[in-house]
Image: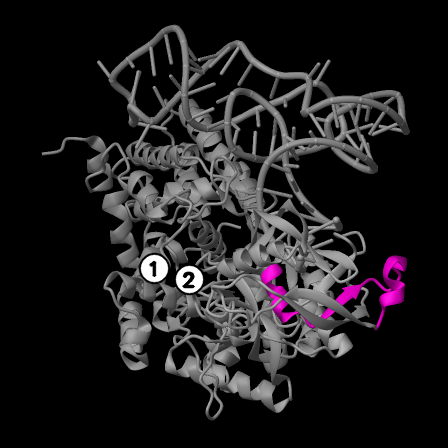
Amino acid sequence: MSTDPFDKASGQDWPTAYNPKETEDKIYQLWMKSGFFTPENLPGDRPKKFITCIAPPNITGELHMGHALENTLQDIIVRMKRMQGYKTLWIPGTDHAGIGAQNAVEKQLAKEGTSRHKLGREKFMERMWEWREKYGHAILEQFKKLGLSVDWTRTKFTMDLDYQKAVEKVFHHYHEKGWIYKGERVVNWCVRCATAISDLEVNYVPEKGKLYYIKYGPFALATTRPETKLGDTALAVHPDDSRYKKYLDQYLEIETTDNETPADQPAQIKKIKIRVVADYSVDPNFGTGIIKVTPAHDMTDFEIGQRHDLPSVQIIDERGRMNENAGSRYQGLKVAEAREKITADLSDLGLIEKIEDYEHNIGRCDRCNSDIEPLLSKQWFLKMKDLAKLAMKAIEEKQVRITPERWIGPYKTWLENIRDWNISRQLWWGHKIPLEGEEDILDTWFSSAIWPLATLGWPDMKNKDFQEYYPTDFITSDRGILFLWQVRMIFSGVELTSQAPFKDMYIHATVLTKDGKRMSKSLGTGVNPLELIEKYGTDALRFGLATQATGLQDIRFGEDLLVMGKKFANKLWNIARYTQLKLGEDYQLGNTPKNEMAGKIEEVAKHITSQIEGYNFAEAANHLYKFIWHELADKYIEETKDKDDQETKDTLAYLLVTSLKLLHPFMPFVTEEIYSRLPWLKEKNLLMIEKWPV
RNA sequence: GGACGCUUAGUUCAGUGGUAGAACGUUCGAUUCACAUUCGAAAGGUCGCUGGUUCGAUCCCAGCAGCGUCCACCA
């Protein structure tokens, strides 16, 4: 039916517009079927290897722009390396995401009018595994939409049986070294999640509160949390503060509210004795320069307590309510209620000097946004001193190279100020602490920390994969998890295998909204990459992101980029279509041309290669765009339209094929599709394994 | 409080020690010839502010301002 000469020349239907929807899934299936994502299946002798480490997405996750950017960049490098003749391996997988996944299922249960406690542990765990079956692989399916060339035969989950064994091995390793201990410390306690969380999982948000000046014997002191006064075991001042020198190490008698007066009766005075200690952590310029010390409910106060051997009195329980130590008058009240009640009592007793408006930072749970209650709690800790040294050395000796280099500073600063890692969580979903009689779960990052090892068969160091593919060459991620994940992978790798788990670590840009705000589903500022793929095609998304990925500047995401990408894919399609017509049905590929245009594209190829190797994705993408559109299409094709000689044809063919190869890492689908349509290429492979033109 | 990054056309961003570029948008023109997801052309910027170095600064240095991010968390 078609009389289109293009169809005739190419031997197949070749519409005037590129249609990603008809191409992408089909091409991905072709790649899967080829087996070339698995390094052992790659043709030829490949002495050089290139292994990349993925950031496994959470099973709670949905593809977001960060994933799209991160994995696109990684895929660009992997695809180029594969074409350069490297034996390439990139393992996909998912993370069980302890607290995040548990919260997701708990939310679901709440909708059903039940809870994990009502279900019981066993039933709840069944629900967790159901969740993981249903949603766990959904995000990996979405990675296929992105065109990622990952080895699906090696897909890993952080709670696979072998992975669990690896985690246990790590725990025992540290335990035997004496680096793991159980200690009572003030930890960040999420009242809603009912678990301790790490410092890194606390977000501090500014909030308008009050600063209460409370009379304490001979002086007044300022606090934002009058209710914690029930747990005070000392007062503290700066050692050099002359105002309070005469009170140092004295026990002062002060008047306060009697916490045993029944709640329905007016407040009454009680006299207590309290010690004044000198501590350098006190800022003499805050408030009146004297502070109350509540070792059980404040990190700093806990440390002061340790230094001065102060008792700790816990007055708030794990549900965020005042406990028996708070006295019968306040017991059972929520923290906020207790604050109100005690303020009223103090006021009635004339013990409040003044109340000021005060803006300060309140800790919130990163996962559920509830207030954090610092609580004294028994937790497992991992000593960080030696591990931090290893991580420091790895960077200083360039076992791991960080790009851009400006991240070296924050990396070191973090290690210099590191505290022991609280590795226990009061959750049900995750890796159990592998000791007799222990009920707690390990922090999800404890298992993430060994991802590059465990995915390659560690702790079996004789394992073929481990032998051949460890350590990996390259990892890229967002700066947001530099400390949560990257640093921990580095010291884990060095400690457990004597080798850093990757050689190059690239911190990529963060995708922001057009207004420069963080993209977040909960804020409603997120953009769904799948919808963009639906609208513009994967290649357009990938190319659009790549053209903005400078590594220095965050990306303010607008769809303009994708419009450009989509047009470019179509332009390429039509350049190929034109070339096909020009060459005609009977074209036989001649010699590789040696002329100006051939020279030019060879220069382009060199430039692109070095730019990708230096992680200048934007420069590489833009340069390619400019050459293909404005040199090849606008100039060369226009100028040779009336020519019909063999050299012109050979040059066109050469330019097209070389362009397809160079563009393949950025736009894998359209390039592969076009490549498959060129009948004059004999003995061709899939483009994804053709030889890189440098 | 500490650190880092950014500030260039209407918008999103490149870029260079010798008075600036792209994409998208806008305006005008073209159309049986690969592509209207096109082609040609145009308009549009005292390169955040103030000083300094320099023959010369958008680019180097200092200070300031605004925006953003990370770390700390001061009660």
- Kind of residue sitting beneath label 1: Ile
- Residue B22 horizontal/vertical position (percent): 51, 27
Q: Return the chain for callout 2.
A: A
**Residue A228 can be seen in this image:** yes
Residue A372 painted magenta: no
Q: Dot 2: within a 10 Å radius of its alpha carbon, few (fewer than 14), some, or many (20 or more) residues?
A: many
Callout 1: helix, strand or loop? Answer: helix
> Which chain hosts label 1?
A
In the picture, the disc for residue A57 is: 2
For the residues labelled 2 and 1, say whether their Cβ atoms are less than 8 Å apart: yes
The outermost residue toward the bottom is A436
Q: Above or below — where is A444 with respect to B5?
A: below
Q: Locate residue B58 relative to residue A138 in the image: left or right.
A: right
Residue in front for this viewpoint, A679 or A194: A194
Indicate the quadrant containing the N terminus of chain A: top left, top right, bottom left or bottom right: top left
**Residue A664: percent from the left, percent from the top?**
42, 48
Query: Considering only vertical position in the picture, is B42 above or below A574?
Result: above
Is A141 left or right of A343, judged from the image as shown?
Answer: left
In this view, the residue in front, A567 or A226, is: A226
Residue A139: assigned label: 1
Q: Amino acid at mark 2?
A: Pro
- Which of the 4 image quadrants contains residue A239? bottom right
How far is the residue under mark 2 from the one under mark 1? 8 Å
Q: Name the residue rendered at 58%, 62% in the picture.
A: A227
Q: Is residue A395 visible?
A: no
> Is residue A228 magenta-colored?
yes
Task: State which region is magenta.
Answer: A226-249
Above or below: residue A28 compared with residue B15: below
